[in-house]
Image (cartoon, rainbow, N blue to C red):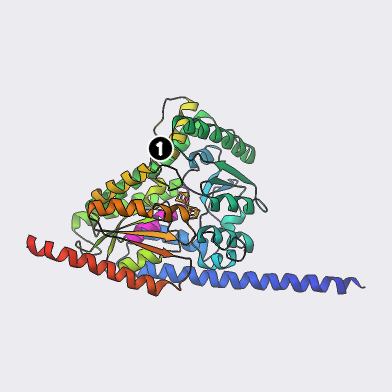
Amino acid sequence: MSSTAIANPVVAQRRREERRRQLFTNKSTHMTQKYLRRVRELGDSLEHMEPFLDVLERIYVRGEHVAVPRGTKTVGTYCVQVPEELVYAAGAQPVKLCSGHYTAFSIGDDVVARDACPLVKAVAGFKQMGTMPAYEDCSLMVVPITCDCKKKIAGLLSETTPVHILPVPANKEDEDVEQLVEEFYGLASVLTQVTGQAITYESLVGALNRTGYAQRELSRFLELKRTTPGLLYGTHAMAAMNASAYLGGDDWARAMRSLNDALVRRAHAGELVTRKDLPRIMLTGSPIVFPNLKIPLLVEEMGGLVVADETCMGERGMSDPVVPVDASFDGLMRALAIRALRPCPCPTFADNTQRIYRLRQMVRDYHVEGVIYHVLRGCLVYDYEYRLMEEELERLGIPVIRLESDYTDQDVEQLRIRIEAFVEMIKLKKGPLRAMRS
Ligand code: SF4
Ligand code: SF4
């Protein structure tokens, strides 16, 4: 047989693969553009939102690499339990890779177990297609074992990328903190091998200052949102939080600072983007990851206002500060472990009184009038906790609905009907109160 005859099927196969990837890229770009357009058209979007929307567009539509200083390696992370400070301290840049992409989900649906959650299916889809630089550039991925889906996706990712598995204790006792401190020392040494840069006391303090700057701007932002309802749409706030996945800590903090300064000016001038008295909705439950913003978009398109989001890609993702136990290297490592465990309301812990406490606090702080509990299909841990949350909210007299969704547009109409009815019900409930006050 001639070499041409052998080569032809190979070339043909390669062309088929290229066509498949091109088709995937076209569909995936179209999907992201659609959601970005809806976010931009939602209402009066501040120009200071642009850096956040721009990075989402660069990564998902233009397929750009995550911008890092020359020679800097990127480390993919999943979940809030991975201490980004260690990644920075080793001279690398963390990139959060949990995904909300429908096109990638449709590919991953054929790759992982049918009942796995869409978030890990979307991750699997991107890895399968190999078209997304944010994934392909990673020198290492750190996957915490928080739930079964994360455990299995860690195995799948390790077929093509170096993966460090980070076991996370199921409890929050002193011995669990000790166990996590050990794990963080192990992670620090893997990061050092990957970057060739040792993590020192000084580099760790520098990293803590860096994330601390971002957290300070985030708390300013949350305070502005809390004290001046209608200053910006909740969907815009969630897009800004999601953008932190691809903007280095300093860049995100600077963009957030400009947004905060603009919001302060607007608050003083009384310039609001919505009426103040719209039904005040809190989102909680399974992660809401860009571009899967259909639920916050529907809430705000239907006349509600997302005043708070208690999800891991939103406020919760960055809000817990690191409080050093003492000024030694070990004290800093211990503080990172405590931050990852004690205040964390992820439903993957066995005892989740912390989550109920956080929910109560947010309902009070944001004057929440209704809660939407989001369950991604296949996300058992959140589904499991719904009953507890429902009971607690009933005690507080706050209406709640459970919305199950997937990474597809097919459930949008059904979601729209339920969200519209929920928003209308809160408006009716508010009506008599307004009448009594006037
Ligand atoms: S809620 Fe789930 S996906 Fe989000 S950080 Fe926690 S364990 Fe990870
Ligand atoms: S916590 Fe839920 S959404 Fe997150 S990875 Fe696990 S199953 Fe998926």
Residue farthest to the right, as pictured:
1
Residue ID for mark 1: 342
Q: Is residue 235 magenta?
A: yes
Q: Going 61% across and 59% down the picture, which residue do you hit? A: 127
- Compared across the picture, whether 302 is left or right of 143 comes to left
Rendered view: 295 above or below 176: below
Q: Using the image, determine if residue 85 lies above or below residue 292.
A: above
Q: Is residue 84 visible?
A: yes
Identify the main secondary structure in magenta: helix
Percent across and percent down for residue 281 are 28, 59
Counting from the top left corner in percent of width and height, residue 112 is at: 60, 60
Q: Which image quadrant is residue 187 in? A: top right
Q: Which residues are magenta?
A: 234-248
Q: Residue at x 56, y 43 (%)?
A: 92
Q: Examine the rendering and report whether any part of residue 64 can be seen.
A: no
Identity of the residue drawn at 49% across and 70% down: 31
Q: Is residue 435 above or below residue 351?
A: below
Horizontal side of residue 180 vs 316, given as left or right: right
